[in-house]
Image (tube, rainbow, N blue to C red):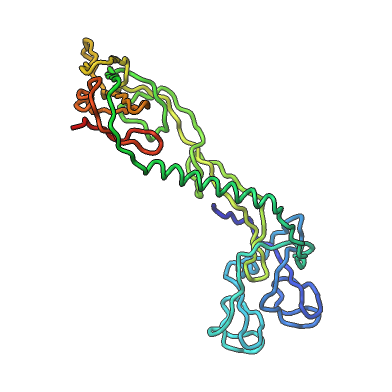
Amino acid sequence: MAQKILGYVELVWTCDSCQTKNPGAIKSCTSCGAPQPLDVRFEQVDPNTFNFIKDEALIRMAQSGPDKHCPFCGTRNLANAAVCVKCGGDLTVGSTSRPTGEVVLPAQSAPQPAQAKPREPKSKAASIVLILVLLSICAFGVFLLTKMMSKDTMKATVASTQWERVVPIEAYQQVARSDWADAIPSEAVITSCSLEYHYDSNQPTKNSEEVCGEPYVVDTGTGVGKVVQDCYYKVYEDYCSYEIMEWGVVDTLRLSGTDLNAVWPSRALANYERVGTVSETYTIWFSTSGDTYSMRTSNYNLYQQAYPGSRWEIEINGLGAVTSAKPAN
């Protein structure tokens, strides 16, 4: 999110010694002369409006960087000062720059000492219920995993079978599509376009709309506040309808049966048609000890061995699903 600068405003700070409010740019108290403390907290003068500074010198000062405090006497100095204005101490070594970027509050809204709120005791019954629910979920998950991992091998007899084969028929034809303009294939014919919201950007671009939050004041570390807005840009781009020639399913041929000799459905194809991706599904039902199990596969060679009454060896997991099967020796 981009930060938009609207201007600069004067701030105030409160003297720790006499509680006098002083202009932000003043480096010592106008009442008692005490230096501005290192941990001074600047405040906004007017909570209802921004009285933007016109003084170019103050604006340049705010833009030059945060003030720094003398390591010898604590006096606040400009960012580019090499020696302290009060004691003449060397500021190139050991000086501390004011922190910047903190949101400045109105003077009358300065934070008050927080009152400790009494901790509300949690309901013991609610905690117990939550724990029991979590334990139940964990236990059920462990149960399912255990069942899926467990295997049981047994002898079974093929009770019945069924097959299904599907052949999609595709045609090369003109179809209507829609997409963003830069994603449309070059061979397509665009029929219409309209500007629609696509994404957000931190930078202004063509066909973008600026969206900004409420202005607020940021501490520059100089006693001058920077009024900013957090902004982003809603970018609108062409979303188009177009026509293009492509392969698509126009017919689906299906055949099914219960014998072991599956065949593929077919029909005559036009010169603009072709066969798509075919699929085949074979289901075998096994009977053992009064129970019935089923297995689906796409292995036609395995299916052809499943003649009714043949003996098989099947593997079943704890959930009753057949995980593998093969003819018994």
Q: Is residue 277 visible?
A: yes
Q: Position of residue 246 (x, y in %)?
A: 30, 23
The answer to whether residue 117 is above or below residue 246 is: below
Residue at x-position 57% and y-position 87%: 90
Q: Is residue 311 left or right of residue 108?
A: left
Q: Is residue 310 left or right of residue 199?
A: left
Residue at x-position 60% and y-position 89%: 89
Give the residue furthest to the top. Answer: 268
Q: Quadrant of the C terminus?
A: top left
Q: Position of residue 163 (x, y in %)?
A: 28, 19
Residue at x-position 28% and y-position 35%: 324
Front-lying residue, 286 or 55: 286
Q: Is residue 108 left or right of residue 268?
A: right
Q: Is residue 170 visible?
A: no
Q: Position of residue 132 (x, y in %)?
A: 60, 49
Front-lying residue, 289 or 82: 289
Q: Position of residue 120 (x, y in %)?
A: 74, 57
Q: Is residue 40 left or right of residue 271?
A: right
Q: Quadrant of residue 64?
A: bottom right
Q: Quadrant of residue 62?
A: bottom right
Front-lying residue, 263 or 140: 140
The answer to whether residue 253 is above or below residue 72 is: above
